[in-house]
Image (cartoon, rainbow, N blue to C red):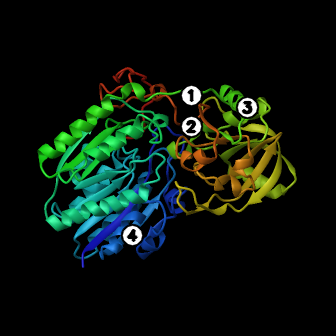
Amino acid sequence: MTRIAVGGFLHETNTFAPTKATYDDFVHGGGWPAMALGAGVLKTMRNINVGLAGFVEAAQANGWELVPTISCGASPSAHVTEDAFERVVKVMVDGIRDAGPLDAVYLDLHGAMVTEHFDDGEGEILARVRKVIGKDLPLVVSLDLHANVTPAMVEHADALIAYRTYPHVDMADTGRAAARHLALLLQSGQKFAKSFRQLPFLIPISWQCTNDQPTKGIYQKLAALESDAVPTLSFAPGFPAADFPDCGPSVFAYGRTQADADSAADAMTKIIAGHEDDFDGRIYSPDEGVRHAMELAKSARKPIVIADTQDNPGAGGDSDTTGMLRALVRNNATKAAIGVIYDPLSAQAAHAAGVGATVALALGGKSGISGDAPYKENFIVEKLSDGQFVAPGPYYGGRDMDMGPSAALRIGDVRVVVSSHKAQLADQSMYRYVGIEPTEQSILVNKSSVHFRADFEPIAEKLLICASPGAMPADTATLPWTRLRPGIRIKPNGPAFTSAVNSGSPSSAIG
């Protein structure tokens, strides 16, 4: 029987964010499933939208024996601590080393992990795995669409295969695609030629959405370029908040011959570069966005949904800034709701006070983001929750969620979801678990950039993007870059990076 060692370790690192990812964050998981070890990995990875779950399903259908090591993920944040990285990777590598005879290894990684001691977290993971398994054993990896792919990652893996949707509704599908590619490697006994290209400009995440052009059309053309000669072709727009030289978009192809791989990679790179002008759109200030939403709501039959994009916990924000809440209250918005504000102390105070009580809170604003502060006001406690629920929408895909003690608070006619754990608001259930019915609101403000669209577009009259204080600027040119590769443009059609551009305090990542 074919024996495959498997594991997963996922983190998207914003080196400008205020909070690092500790080992305990990976144990809990945030928006990811909780950490699982050994046989527990296979029990956890069933019928959910995660790359490893899709691979497990396909592998079992193929009759492969799986040797699970570890699976874990944590909400995007600043650097992964050295302690967390070393503890997780030791379990993964030791599990592969001690697995006995293997035919291949599959790993579910993010591709944009920066640690306290390595710029290229995934490159280091793959180098250690390769050292254990040798140069001949197939090593296949699924990656997030936001991967900042590095030469080391390409060198050590026999195939890197990235998601093709943002919102990421195809994470499990990507795991299945990795299984298909691995089957080709096992059947042929030969490896494919590799080709890797990096694009010369950063792409802000708000304009990477595959529901819209130009990205939607780019992925359609990518699929058309795949063939028997080039069975796997990927485009990763990148995560533009990691201050190190390999941050940015990339293309990677695997072909029967080097010419096949190079031809597909060059064609894809040319297509993407031709759309540089198109990675742009309207972003509102908090007051502009709220007032526009209120005007639209007068005639709308469905909610107006606003993305609080810069405080997205799916991009390293702490999900606790108060700019959008202040704008809702300041403009007397009605039938409005905002979520999720991460504030364990306020959630605890609401639980202590009880439903119906009025509590004086200093809500949110605790992450130290410039231009933000706790919102000191009186709130009515409308509903309490233990934070345990299932998120059935397309993005979370049926995951068990644990937001910790949570509450629905009200100020005026604005309702606020407050939690004790972080996860981006990408599922309607993240309102419902505290008694707020999203379809009955006039305005919804979601702390998310794009993932929310998978579950909210069907119920939304209009989607708007607002930029209030947060750790993930909608305009990548405003970040204090110090360590990008020379010449890359810090936004589409923006200035080229030099050591003098946006010089400021350097990232603490040291590779």
Determine the residue positioned at 56% across, 37% down.
Answer: 309
Whichever of callouts 1 and 4 sits on the residue coming sooner in the sequence is 4
Q: Amino acid at mark 1?
A: Ile
Residue toward you, 383 or 369: 383
Mark in front: 1 vs 2: 1
Q: Residues within 10 Å of mark 2 (few under 14, many from 20)?
A: many
Determine the residue positioned at 70% across, 56% down.
Answer: 432
Mark in front: 3 vs 2: 3
Q: Work out how far the residue at label 4 is from the one at label 2, CA to CA, in angstroms.
A: 34 Å
Give the number of the disc on residue 294. Answer: 3
Task: Classify mark 1: helix, strand or loop.
Answer: loop
Say if 458 sits above or below 327 in the image. Answer: below
Residue denoted by label 1: 283
Q: Amino acid at mark 2?
A: Thr
Q: Work out how far the residue at label 3 is from the one at label 4, CA to CA, in angstroms.
A: 46 Å
Residue denoted by label 4: 57
Quarter occupied by the N terminus: bottom left
Q: Work out how far the residue at label 1 is from the one at label 4, CA to CA, in angstroms.
A: 40 Å
Indicate the position of residue 375 as horizontal and vertical percent values. 74, 37
Residue denoted by label 2: 309
Task: Classify mark 2: helix, strand or loop.
Answer: helix
Q: Are marks 1 and 4 in contact (CB under 8 Å)?
A: no
Whichever of callouts 3 and 2 sits on the residue coming sooner in the sequence is 3
Indicate the position of residue 416 as horizontal and vertical percent values. 73, 46
Whichever of callouts 4 and 2 sits on the residue coming sooner in the sequence is 4
Whichever of callouts 1 and 2 sits on the residue coming sooner in the sequence is 1
